[in-house]
Each structure stands twice: as structure tokens, then as C-alpha cells.
Image: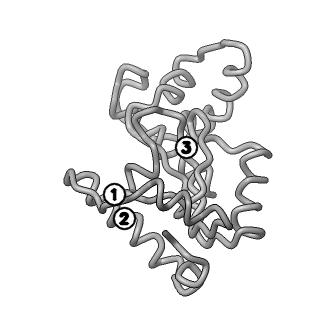
Amino acid sequence: MLTKAARDKMTADEIINCMKEGNRRFRQGYFLTHDPLAEQKATMGGQHPAAIILGCIDSRAPAEVIMDLGIGYAFNARVAGNVVNEDILGSMEFACKVAGSKVILVMGHTSCGAVKGAIDGVELGNLTGLLTKIRPAIEAVKFEGERSSKNAAFVDAVALKNVELTIA
């Protein structure tokens, strides 16, 4: 469990390195031993997450698993295509200004369905407006080759550009 005292001693670089190390463990197929029930019980009196992570809703990209984080280590905001809106910004403000998180991390991922939908110009109810927010990334990507949702390299280039534009 991450205590307030431990979080407050950490620098932003140390927090980022902790997440990178967790991701390295994930990619190598081993994890720290977490006791979710004990972590949940220990955080009942309050939470002191070190970071707020904005990620996609993709079921294959849960930030806590990908970065081997336990309960209470990070806030996690998820929305298709990891796009920012006023609700996400408000959540980030809460995480940093009220709860004391020191790092905002925007996490895209490969083979993003929202990015593919934006490339294809999908229109479907409320999804249409969400995908419109990814269009600037599509337009900004400098890419030699087929600019299609069937081209994995293009999709991943757009996903990366989407992250870059989000943090700009």
C-alpha cells in the first residue's frame, strides 16, 4: 500500500520509474505479490495515489495490471481512445490538487479500436463525437504508406500522435 508519507517523499521521476519497472515486469511475465483484499482494507480510511493515468477502455489495457500497481497507487480514468474532455480534466484536477497525485500519465496502446473507428469515420450515436476528438491526430501524422485502419503501423502512429496531442 502506498501511504501518504511514502507518496510525499517520491519525486515525479521516481513515480514514473516505478510505473516503468512495473511495465517491465509485466512484459517479462512476472509480478510483485499484491494482496488486493489487504490493500483495499488498508485504503478504507483514505487514498494517496501517486499518479492519475488516462487510458483507453480497451479490456486488454488495464493500467494497474500493465504497470503492476496495487490498489491505491494510481487513479485511473478510462475512456475510448484516451481522449480528454471536461470530466476527465476535472478528475485530473481532483487527483492532483485535492488528493496530491504528482504525475499525470496519458497511456495509448497498440491496435486501438477507437483510433481505427476515427480513421474509418465511424458514426454511431455518442461515439461519433468522441471519435471526432481523435481526428486531429490522424491529420497530424506524417506517414509514408497506406493511411488505413487496416494498416497496423498507421493505427499505432495515430495512437501515439493522439497521446502527444493530449499532453501538449
Is residue 47 found left or right of 36 in the rendered image? right
Tag 2 or tag 3, which sits nearer the N-term? 2
Within 10 angstroms of label 3, few (less than 14), some, or many (20 or more) residues?
A: many
Type of amino acid at the residue the image marks with label 3: Asn
Label 3: state its secondary structure. Answer: helix
Q: Which residue is mark 3?
A: 162
Q: Nearer the viewer, residue 10 or 47?
A: 47
Residue 23 numbered mark, or none: 1
Q: Residue furthest bottom?
A: 9
Q: Quadrant of residue 101?
A: bottom right
Instruction: Please identify, in this view, whether the residue under mark 3 or under mark 1 is nearer the observer.
Output: 1
Within 10 angstroms of label 1, few (less than 14), some, or many (20 or more) residues?
A: many
Residue 95, given in percent of the width and then of the height, sits at 70, 62
What is the spatial separation of the Cα atoms under label 3 and label 2, in whole angstroms?
20 Å
Question: Residue shown at 39%/49% (left/top)?
Answer: 65
Tag 1 or tag 3, which sits nearer the N-term? 1
| Residue 41 versus residue 64 in the image, above or below | below
Question: Residue shown at 55%/53% (left/top)?
Answer: 106
Within 10 angstroms of label 2, few (less than 14), some, or many (20 or more) residues?
A: some
Question: Residue shown at 48%/73% (left/top)?
Answer: 15
Label 1: state its secondary structure. Answer: helix
Q: Quadrant of residue 126?
A: top right
Question: Residue shown at 64%/66% (left/top)?
Answer: 47
Q: Which residue is mark 2?
A: 20
Type of amino acid at the residue the image marks with label 2: Lys
